[in-house]
Image (cartoon, rainbow, N blue to C red):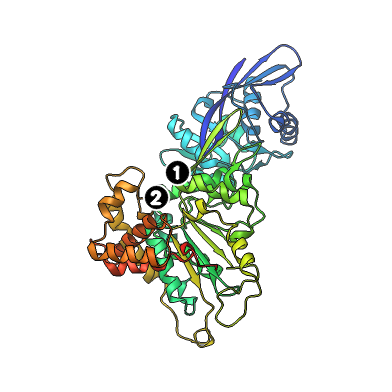
Amino acid sequence: MLIKVFGAAVQGIDATLITIEVNSSRGCMFYLVGLPDSAVKESHQRIISALQVNGYKMPTSNIVVNMAPADIRKEGSAYDLPLAIGLLGASETISSEKFSRYLLMGELSLDGSIQPIKGALPIAIKAREDGFEGLIIPQQNAREAAVVNQLKVYGVSNIKEVIEFFNNERELEPTIVNTREEFYQQQNHSDLDFADVKGQENVKRALEVAAAGGHNLIMIGAPGSGKSMMAKRLPSILPPLSLGESLETTKIHSVAGKLQRGSSLITQRPFRDPHHTISQVAMVGGGSFPQPGEISLAHNGVLFLDELPEFNRGVLEVLRQPLEDRHITISRIKSTISYPANLMLVASMNPCPCGYYNHPTKACVCSPGQVQKYLNKISGPLLDRIDIQIEIVPVPFDKISDQRQGESSSIIRQRVIKARQIQEKRYAECTGIYCNAQMNSRLLATYAQPDDKGLVLLKNAMERLNLSARAYDRILKVARTIADLEETEQILPSHLAEAISYRNLDRENWAG
């Protein structure tokens, strides 16, 4: 008897339908074909144990299982449940009448309980696209998949529930999530607030400008000056995620298995801060079982690189293309996978190996050569992609001991949201451009041209401060954002002056 059961394989952040064909005939052999990996082949032993513990017999006939399309590699243990149901259907232990209406995925334990899987959200989206009535998945993944509307999502905890459901002996309760209500409820919650930061008004302003225009930013300062503290508070002033952005971000974290059990949509912008010992593959993604890297996990959020010069040079260089293209393509012999990577890069570093170069009170013990060598660990092309470079000076005692609260994140966020709305309106006709940081040369010429006074100021600044040519475009982009924050159409000299002050590392004599 030939039976068809449906599952799905996750490739990149999308799913592909997998048809599991089970043919039962006279004999006593078991064949599993269709490019399964070791974990899929081992499912045979898990299925035997799960069925025996729950009082069902493994079919003893000649069984051939084909996982089509046969040219896609099937990886992981999530195929256990559809394989088990297919085997029972082929031996007529359960009714196959409803098989065509449901997509199934889940890993089996030896006692028949069903363990969580990765990529439940893309699988649910695929099930709806292909017109399935429902999706049967592990209970722990049910809320994540139930975000997809017009699809019945059933969370199950044991194979017995699934068998009884197909035999019409049990009704399963669909998991219902009010996506919009939950999304908007949790959207504005943040544990960290800029009100906790004492002093550092110029750095807070730089972070506000970076958030308003989507600009990459680097902070240079002595140890203990508050670089990490302020970077961690940056997501609290970024505009809230839209429902579309949230869905895309949740898909990436779902595929990587990073979602908390029982959670639905991600409502906060991601903040990723990998350690400086991270490898290239962990940063960009890939591996023998391709997974999203830190660049993609920070999609629609912030990638924070603390102690930037301590990172391996190769790891930093792989950031260059994704920062420009806003996506990363991982090419292997057998497959090519693309992950989105639209992120804000925020980095921090000490100005020299001892950390006290340019410090107001402590003496630096590094030679000029050591300072230069330390700064040269960051390549020109990477710095070229960082719009704002701000120097941080340690907070004086009178500011630290001040009991008054600073400006809260919610107030700063309102200004950032207003500036972003201006940009959304401006770039409504431009595909793939949503904020000032993404402006190309044509848009710069249209929307970021200073007046004659501004041009004179810019010319003098570039000559006097020995600013490099690459700083010109960056200054205009940042000045455009400052003008948006002040809701002015024209870029004024004051906007340019502030933008110029954010180019510390571009001054040729900064480390000399």
Along the line of sight, which residue is nearer the eye, 391 or 253?
391
- Report crowding for label 1: few under 14, some 14 to 19, many 20 or more residues within 10 A (C-alpha): few
Position of residue 430 in the picture relative to residue 77 (left or right): left
Above or below: residue 62 compared with residue 250: above
The residue at 49%/38% (across/down) is: 124
Position of residue 349 in the picture relative to residue 216 (left or right): right
Identify the residue under disc 1.
Answer: 325
Q: In what quadrant of the picture does the C terminus appear?
A: bottom right
Q: Is residue 81 visible?
A: yes
Amino acid bearing label 2? Leu
Report helix, strand or loop for mark 2: helix
1 or 2: mark nearer the eye: 1
The residue at 43%/32% (across/down) is: 129
Above or below: residue 142 compared with residue 472: above
Identify the residue under disc 2.
Answer: 243
Along the line of sight, which residue is nearer the eye, 453 or 307?
453
